[in-house]
Each structure stands twice: as C-alpha cells, then as structure tokens.
Image (spheres, rainbow, N blue to C red):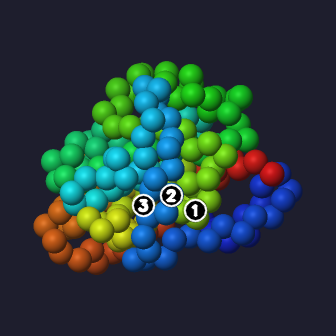
C-alpha cells in the first residue's frame, strides 16, 4: 500500500500535510491532552530518559487491529529501555462514530493497554507531526529529536513472522546510544480522519 504524505484529500478539501524531517524536534510537547483515565498529560510528561514513542492510532481502523497485539509488548520494551510511549487518537471527523473518548476507554480496557492512550483534539498534534495514517510511529531520542518514522514491523498479519521488527530494533538501538540504520519504513494504515 502506498502512503501519500502530501496533498491528501479530506472530505474534498486538499490539505498539505508535511511530515517531520528526520532530526526534527518533537512539536507540541507541552500541549495538554486528556487520556482515557481523564488525566491531563503532555508529550513532555510521557517522555523518558532515552526518548519517546508516539503512535497515531484509533479504534476503528482494521490496520490498527492487525498491529494492536504488539502495542503492549512494545510499551513493555520501551519501559525497560527508559523510553516513554503514548498512542494518540486524532480522528476528529469520526468522533461520533467510534472514536469518542468513551470508545477509547472501552478499547483501552478491552485490550489491556499498559500505556497512555489520549485524545488529540482537532488533530493538532497529528498536523504538527505530519501524520497521515493509523498506525503511524514516530520515535524520538533523549533530546526529543526524530530518529525513526514508519511502521511497527514488516508483517501486519503476524508479528511472530516479521522479518524486521523496525520499532523494537530502533528502541534498543537508541537506548544503547547507537545510531539507527533504518530510519524510515513504509507505512500501511487508514487515513487520519481530519475535519475540513
């Protein structure tokens, strides 16, 4: 599946979405967002000593459902390596069709999420990141500079059969102080449902 970064069309309105460049600082890190436990948080709060993972996710995308069984494993690995993790729901246009906070709470509880799942109201953070898909991963290092952008791994259907576990490898690499070799990978996912 081809991912289109620029000029995506939403409800007939063209929007220019520019993805973060590698090495860019994480934007909107002090914007207050609300998670499924009704707590206020920020990306800065979630970041740990070795970095931060931001996954743009949602409740209704079949691609999220394919990769979702790996979320908790990734969160545990990130925690072991002092990397924070958060998932953001930016689907503002479909809030009343399965993407409302109450839907998010049910999803987090049903899946037993062991990480923060928060609402990106008006897709402000998604816009700042240039995110266009769910799931879409951004990994930042200890300086909150972008070091990896892409998919979780290369096998949506079955994580145990993945040839490359992109995100897991990147987490371990930055935690050990080394440079990531594969900084961008192909993203497969549903479009983020932005408002006009």
Q: Give the mark toward the camera: 2 or 1.
A: 2
Q: CA distance from mark 3 to mark 2?
A: 14 Å
* Circle 3/circle 2 CB separation < 8 Å: no
Spot occupied by residue 116 in the image (x, y as percentages of width and height): 38, 37
Vertical arrangement, residue 175 with respect to residue 48, above or below: below
Q: Is residue 46 left or right of residue 117?
A: left
* Circle 2/circle 1 CB separation < 8 Å: yes
Q: CA distance from mark 3 to mark 1?
A: 12 Å
Residue on which the image places disc 2 = 28
Vertical arrangement, residue 180 with respect to residue 47, above or below: below
Spot occupied by residue 149 in the image (x, y as percentages of width and height): 43, 66
Query: Is residue 11 or residue 117 the one in the foreground?
Result: 117
For disc 2, the neighbor class at 10 Å (few under 14, some 14 to 19, many from 20) is some
Residue found farthest to the right: 12
Residue 46 in sight in this render: yes
Q: Secondary structure at mark 1?
A: helix
Count of marks overlaid on the render: 3
Q: Is residue 142 left or right of residue 1?
A: left
User: Which residue is rendered at x = 62% and y = 29% of the image?
Assistant: 100
Vertical arrangement, residue 173 with respect to residue 112, above or below: below
Query: Is residue 10 or residue 35 the one in the foreground?
Result: 35
Residue on which the image places disc 3 = 138
């Amino acid at each position: 599946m081809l991912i289109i970064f620029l000029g995506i069309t939403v409800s007939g309105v063209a929007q220019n979405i520019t993805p973060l460049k590698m090495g860019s600082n994480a934007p909107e890190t002090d914007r207050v967002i609300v998670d499924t436990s009704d707590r206020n948080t920020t990306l800065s709060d979630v970041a740990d000593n070795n970095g931060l993972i931001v996954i743009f996710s949602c409740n209704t995308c079949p691609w999220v459902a394919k990769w979702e069984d790996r979320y908790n494993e990734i969160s545990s690995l990130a925690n072991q390596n002092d990397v924070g993790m958060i998932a953001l729901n930016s689907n503002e246009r479909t809030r009343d069709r399965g993407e409302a906070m109450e839907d998010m709470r049910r999803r987090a509880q049903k899946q037993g999420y062991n990480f923060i799942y928060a609402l990106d109201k008006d897709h402000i953070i998604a816009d700042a990141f240039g995110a266009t898909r769910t799931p879409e991963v951004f990994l930042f290092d200890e300086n909150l500079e972008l070091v990896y952008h892409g998919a979780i791994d290369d096998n949506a259907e079955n994580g145990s059969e993945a040839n490359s576990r992109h995100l897991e490898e990147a987490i371990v690499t930055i935690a050990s102080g080394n440079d990531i070799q594969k900084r961008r990978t192909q993203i497969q996912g549903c479009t983020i449902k932005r408002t006009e």
